[in-house]
Amino acid sequence: MDLKYSDEYEAFRGEVKAFLEQNWPLKDEEAKLSGPEKSTLFRQRAIEHGFVARSIPKRYGGSEQAPDVLRARIIAEEFAKARAPADIRGIGASMLVPTLLEHGEEWQKERFIPPTIRGEMIWCQGYSEPGSGSDLASLQTKAELDGEEWLINGHKVWTTGAEIAHYMFCLCRTEPEAEKHAGISYLLIDMKTPGIQVSPLRQMTGTADFCEVFFNDLRIPAKNIVGKRGQGWIVSRSTLKHERNMIGNAEGTRSTFRALLRFAKQAQLNGRPAIEDPTVRQRLGQIEGYVASHFYSGYRQLTLAARGQEAGIAGMLNKLTSTNIAHMMAKLAIDLAGDEALETPAPDEIMKINPRGGQAWVSNYMWSLGLSIAGGTANIQRNVIAERGLGLPRDRAVQRT
Amino acid sequence: MDFGLSEEQELLQETVRRFVANECPPPRLREIFDGKDGYDPQLWAGMLKMGLGGLVVPEAYGGAELELLDLALVAEVLGAGAVPGPFLGHSLATLVLVLAGSSEQKERWLPSLASGDALGSVAFGEEGDVWEPAGWSARVESGKVTGTKTYVPYAGLADWILVGVAGGQFAVVPRGGEGVKLEPVAGVDRTRRLDRLTLDGAPCEVLPESVAGRVRDAGLILLAADAFGGGTTLVEMSVEYAKTREQFGQPIAQFQAVKHRLADMATELEPARGLFWYAAHAFDHIPDEAERAAALAKAHITDRYMQIARDAVEVHGGIGFTWECDVQIWFKRALFDRTFLGSPAFHRERAAQLGDW
């Protein structure tokens, strides 16, 4: 066990730092460019140096580096410190690109990967439907092959960014006679195609961060299918295989905990700083135990990945653990917020990553519920942990092929 | 950057795990648990043969000269097996001598403790839930120690008892010496027996260095490691029981209410593995963070152990509530781990103060 990086890695860190010092922020004429232009220009240089788009082949605009979670970690640390644009985030880069790399046809990779990793092509995900949440494979949006086109009708929901996305990767039922998982195909939809209606979906927080998307006799080219007909379920399971950031989530949790600690110092309870209250101190201490565990479990998973070993059950616990912690923090925060919890959070206090005042924490209290639902609800996580992690029997109702 | 175990550490755990499976399987554990003194000379001799008596003792004194992390990894495996005996008190006694003894004192005591020819124990607790060295009132005057120490592990079997005294030093007292009175405590954990020690002008030898804080931290980490190991066993036992126990015509593991509880037990426990690893690593290598990390690990993991033990009883249903069911053995180790050296709440408050909250 050694928490220091070896000389080889520290030398690499030196290269990253030197690159950042020279290239970010942009200087002279380039400093006058718009924000997105600056990011694109810088990112291109970072790709040339092998610091960004590392898992993407050069022919698709990536830097094609050998997988190395520790180098990836060092890049993430140094880019974050310099506040420099790192890998494009969002589901295009994190979900679509790995899927295309594994299952896409050559023209699809050439057409879609380069603009996506440059941040020029934005994607949304068409998975959930009003009748298909946890039981996603029951989805009913229908796509029929009509000559050289798919004719699509249906209704998607919880679509983040549908109003700004250029394209959607979408699961549709193309084989109505097949068993439910075998009847799904993975299609790529240009969001400018006639027949698409996007409406915002307002959440309990008062803001609208998701959309509903309606397809009415939408027609897209037949070749816009990834994988074969009926393989969409398997195709959609592709994930980033290399350099997955195992600590990012735990670091976010730790930073929110520090914000909570600051709030406890600033909030008053019975006329004194809340942090002096023994109950508050105990609750903070309990939460810190979970936060620190989550963090060191992340370090352990990073090490296992660097050694080429599997994390086992530990890797399955990350999402449930982080949502559990988010709930504990939010619960303590509204107890500290006092009467501010009676007020509707002001619009600029909503969805702060590191909340400061009482209203931002009240908003966070609501958001923490969204966290435990999005991307697989807490109870679905428990099923995964129980069945795949602990070897318990599958639910009887869920027969899978 | 490597936050993982070495091959040697994995081998050490595997070796001890195999030993426990062979030499202390549940029926044998049960006999010792129900026995008079919670001690099996043959089992302890086997542990000594593996070198577990002197893991942190320098090689010059016959030990393995390993780090606290190695000791904690062994504690985890022994906790998983609920192995009865004096490992905790003896290990801490050797650590006291390593950290506080003069070279002459080390030379005199450590070889026999490392080989196990002599058994050691440490006396931390005092009346009124006092565990912290700052609250110790046992006093040494003219080479004689007077005071009462509560809950001394296996003091009745120890050759030497290292008694914490006012000021944070340790005084070495021979068990059978003049002015030394021992009374067995009817302890809840029958795998780690305790005695009450009354000292009335008992001749002693004081070790020069004040190391009580360091030894306390080591103790907290060993308890956290034991708790983690015990927790993993309770999760495994509960999973196995849920798979085999049938009600309403199916294994109870088929019911989501049971599955989800088991998933929650694993989720509560498994991430904390890194917490005791980190605390042990900090003890050896990151002095600035060591004290707080130890307090946090003890508070968090022993609390998780206790809750998992309650959950395990519930998953086992009626049988889980019986003396016959082995769950109670780990349940009581959980009670020991959370209480010994101070409660989770106590150490959480210490961690708060150490963090300048």
Image (cartoon, grey):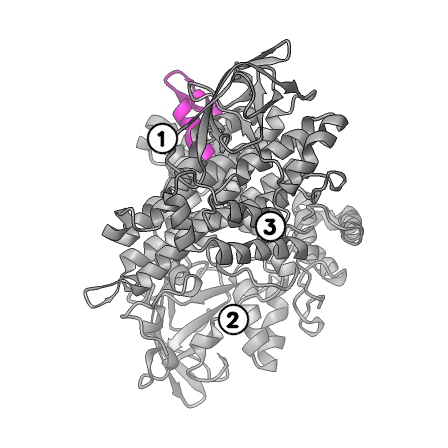
Q: Is residue A232 left or right of residue A248?
A: left
Per the image, the residue denoted by label 2 is A238
Label at residue A299:
3
Callout 2 crowding tier (Cα within 10 Å): few <14, some 14–19, many ≥20: some
Give the answer, above or below, for where A360 lies relative to A140.
above
Label disc, if present, on residue A335 of the rendered structure: 1
Stretch of the chain drawn in magenta: A265-288
In front here: B210 or B175?
B175
Residue A371 visible in the snapshot: no
Q: Which mark is residue B133?
A: none
Q: Residue at x 50, y 58 (%)?
A: B22
Q: Position of residue A267 (x, y in %)?
A: 43, 24
Q: Nearer the viewer, residue B82 or A26?
A: B82
Residue at screen point 44% across, 56% down: B25
Task: State how far apart marks 2 and 1 are (Cα).
Answer: 41 Å
Q: Main secondary structure of the magenta part?
A: helix
Q: Label 2's element? A: loop
Q: Which quadrant, please, contains the C terminus of chain A?
A: bottom left
SS at badge 1: helix
Near mark 1 (Cα within 10 A), the count class, few <14, some 14-19 or many ≥20, is: some
User: Do tags 1 and 3 sit on the same chain?
Assistant: yes
Q: Nearer the viewer, residue A8 or B108?
A: B108
Earlier in the chain: of badge 2 and badge 1, it is 2
